[in-house]
Amino acid sequence: MKDIIIAIDGYSSSGKSTMARQLAAAIGYAYIDSGAMYRAVTLHAMRQGMISPDGTLDTQALTRALPHIAIDFRVPQGETASHTYLNDTDVEQEIRTMAVSAHVSPVAAVPDVRHALTEMMRRYGLRRRIVMDGRDIGTTVFPDAEMKIFVDASPQERARRRHAELIAKGNTDTSYEEVLQNIRQRDHIDRTRSESPLRQAPDAIILNNDNLTPDAQAAWLLEKYRQIADA
Ligand code: DC
């Protein structure tokens, strides 16, 4: 089997991270969540007061701070999954909050932020053997990745899953329609930003998981990996 890079791109709430994490565990590769890196930079900007209460980002201050932001992934003692660390502190919980989700889009649209994080991501791929998920992994970060998957699921199906997740976590205040609207809005921002917009790489394999069970999807991915790494 060859050592390869696996890039999984797609829309928000399409199940990318779950499938990337599972595949990495199944084949003994490292899993890198590139969205977590954008979230960690956003958290740093929030903590340093670079985002005003009306949501305006001080782009210059953030650009100046970039050399002082270190992000890495470690498995904390007693845990099995890796956590995101920002300047040596575990921020895995904090980067998933609604507050960070609300501010991450403008941060991810800043070209200097994208360049710095793209460099960091490429260092993870130096020895290949990684599964990385995001929006521009197969197009910009690793255009030479041997396996590229573009995950496509309808906004309705993604909203249905996300809404069910919220209900399961006890959040009954958000309606399906609100979730659907938020997903459509994020799709629009991801697709239309000028720097590295979400688009399918010409050599990506499309995975539409509207009608696939998680097990069928995992088996499909493993099969694709074997075909590519064995060739
Ligand atoms: O996948 P996620 O929701 O955790 O991503 C968080 C944000 O980061 C989202 O607004 C899109 C952005 N992102 C990006 O622009 N490029 C990536 N490779 C990964 C995420």
Image (spheres, rainbow, N blue to C red):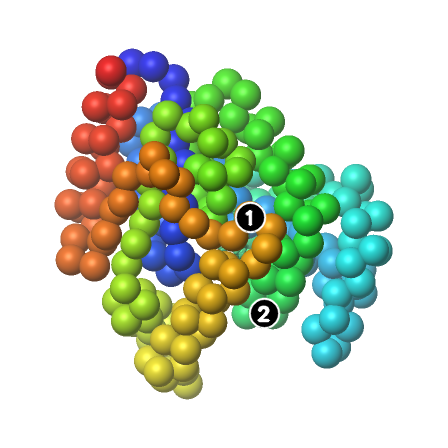
Q: Position of residue 68 (x, y in %)?
A: 80, 42
Q: Height in image: 51 above or below 171?
A: above
Label 1 beta carbon within 8 A of ligand 1 = yes
Of the image marks 1 and 2, the number of the one nearer the N terminus? 2
> Dot 2 corresponds to which residue?
102
> Dot 1 corresponds to which residue?
196
Element type at mark 2: helix
Q: Work out whether residue 223 can be spotted.
A: yes
Q: Tag 2: residue type?
A: Ala
Spatial CA distance of label 1 from label 2 is 20 Å
Q: Kindly identify the residue that appears in the image at 41 percent across and 69 percent down.
A: 183
Q: As rendered, which of 22 and 222 lies closer to the eye?
A: 222
Q: As rendered, which of 205 and 192 lies closer to the eye?
A: 192
Q: Tag 1: residue type?
A: Ser
Dividing the picture into quarters, in which one does residue 28 lie? top left
Q: Height in image: 162 above or below 208?
A: below
Element type at mark 1: loop
Q: Position of residue 2 (x, y in %)?
A: 34, 14
Q: Kindly identify the residue that appears in the image at 21 percent across and 59 percent down.
A: 210
- Picture disc at residue 154: none
Location of the C terminus (image quadrant): top left
Q: Work out whether residue 161 can be spotted.
A: no
